[in-house]
Image: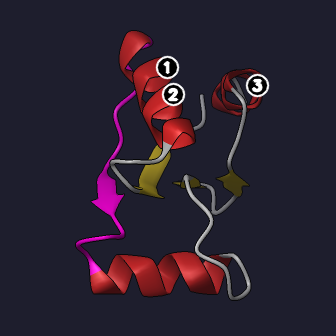
Amino acid sequence: MTKIKVIYGTEWCGDCVRSTKYLAEHNVPYKWIDIDSDVDGKRKTIELNKGKARVPTIVFEDGTILVEPTNRELKKKLKE
């Protein structure tokens, strides 16, 4: 099972809320970084997304990244 290293997001982002709710319902641990209050987190999000602050940006321990994933995409990645 692939593990999540960190999720970059914001409190007001509907996709962030949906993704973290899905992860909580499935007992998947993660580190949350709110890019509205964490300057380094915002910089990293912009770097990972080639100049755009797209959220949620989910970084996995294997180095892969999902940006604005659906629950189906999360489920598939977590089962790897």
Q: Is residue 3 visible?
A: no
Q: On the image, numbered disc 2 is attached to which residue? A: 18
N-terminal label among 2 and 3: 2
The Cα atoms of the two marked residues, 1 and 2, are separated by 6 Å
N-terminal label among 3 and 1: 1
Q: Quadrant of the C terminus?
A: top right
Q: On the image, numbered disc 3 is attached to which residue? A: 76
Q: Residue at x 68, y 88 (%)?
A: 51
Q: Residue at x 62, y 65 (%)?
A: 54
What is the chief secondary structure element of the magenta stretch? loop
The Cα atoms of the two marked residues, 2 and 3, are separated by 16 Å
Please state the extent of the stretch shown in magenta in the rendering.
26-38
Callout 3: helix, strand or loop? helix
Q: Is residue 49 magenta?
A: no
In this rendering, which labeled residue sits more in front, label 1 or label 2? 2
Left or right of residue 37: residue 73: right
Amino acid type, callout 1: Tyr
40, above or below 41, in the image: below
Q: Residue at x 58, y 82 (%)?
A: 46
52, above or below 32, in the image: below
Q: Are marks 2 and 3 in contact (CB under 8 Å)?
A: no
Circle count:
3
27, above or below 49, in the image: above
| Label of residue 22 in the image | 1
Amino acid type, callout 2: Arg
Q: Furthest-left residue in view? A: 37
In this rendering, which labeled residue sits more in front, label 2 or label 3? 2
- Give 21 or 76, whichever is nearer the viewer: 21
Residue 15, quarter of picture:
top right
Q: Furthest-front residue in view? A: 12
Callout 2: helix, strand or loop? helix
